[in-house]
Image (spheres, rainbow, N blue to C red):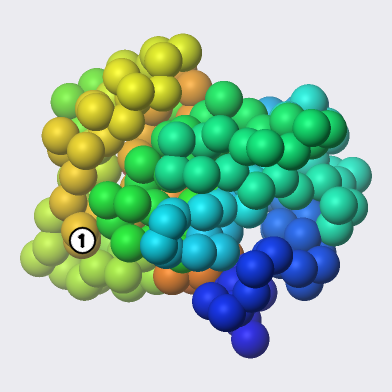
Amino acid sequence: MRPGEADPGEADPGEHVGRALAAECARYAAMGWMRGTSGNLSVVVGRDPLRLAVTVSGKDKGELTADDVVLVDAAGRTDDPVRVPSAEAALHGRIAAVSGAGAVVHVHALAPVVAAERSPGGVGLRDLEMLKGFGRHAHDDLVVVPVVPNSQDMRVLGDAFEAGFRPDVPALLVARHGVYVWGDDLLQARHRLECLEWLLRFEVGIS
């Protein structure tokens, strides 16, 4: 089973999902992409109805354990009396529902924020080898990563995401906030995020 890939027959996501989410958070925190308690990751653990395992809110993402995960529904709501998901869990649910993704990653890397600031209508990328790692062609393939204005209302962000959603662009830039990237599982989402971050660093000239 790949990292963060849930067993569709499980009633509970299990410790392996919590361990995978904690390990991915530690990786991104070490890169400086989840500073303080920022950012959140999720894995789909059920489709009918949609349920996700989401990292908890308010904890240092470099120090999470397998227990720092909470189950939420498609709207980001939970019945857990103790663990609190980020309000952004609702956007994770919207992305998973619309895109069919199995995992969603949200980090606060600098390059995506700078790129969104410079290109608020969408960030265009083409003729770069690293695009292959993002699931696109290295040449003659214009990739436009959508940018939406930031909002504290996840319904507003979800509507903006869905309005600009394209199945061949598995990412969303939220202005002055961060980036969401998704994939079939955490490993694919990680590879896409790392490649996109490199592409955006190139685009804005951050070394």
On screen, residue 163 versus residue 110, left or right, reads left
Query: Looking at the figure, which quarter contains the C terminus?
Result: top right
Residue 206 x %, y %: 51, 36
Taking depth in this image into account, of 112 and 186 the one nearest to the observer is: 186
Residue 13 x %, y %: 68, 65
Q: Is residue 105 above or below residue 147?
A: below
Q: Residue at x 24, y 28 (%)?
A: 159
Taking depth in this image into account, of 197 and 185 the one nearest to the observer is: 185
- Residue most extreme to the left: 140
- Residue most extreme to the bottom: 1
Does any portion of residue 193 appear in the rendered image?
no
Q: Quadrant of residue 78?
A: top right
Q: What element does badge 1 sit on? A: loop
Q: Residue at x 81, y 67 (%)?
A: 15
Say what amino acid the circle numbered 1 marks.
Answer: Asp
Taking depth in this image into account, of 174 and 124 the one nearest to the observer is: 174
On screen, residue 186 versus residue 121, left or right, reads right
Q: Which residue is mark 1?
A: 168
Q: Is residue 194 above or below residue 69?
A: below
Q: Is residue 166 above or below residue 207?
A: below
Q: Residue at x 56, y 34 (%)?
A: 77
On screen, residue 180 versus residue 5, left or right, reads left
Residue 168 x %, y %: 20, 61
Q: Residue at x 28, y 25 (%)?
A: 148
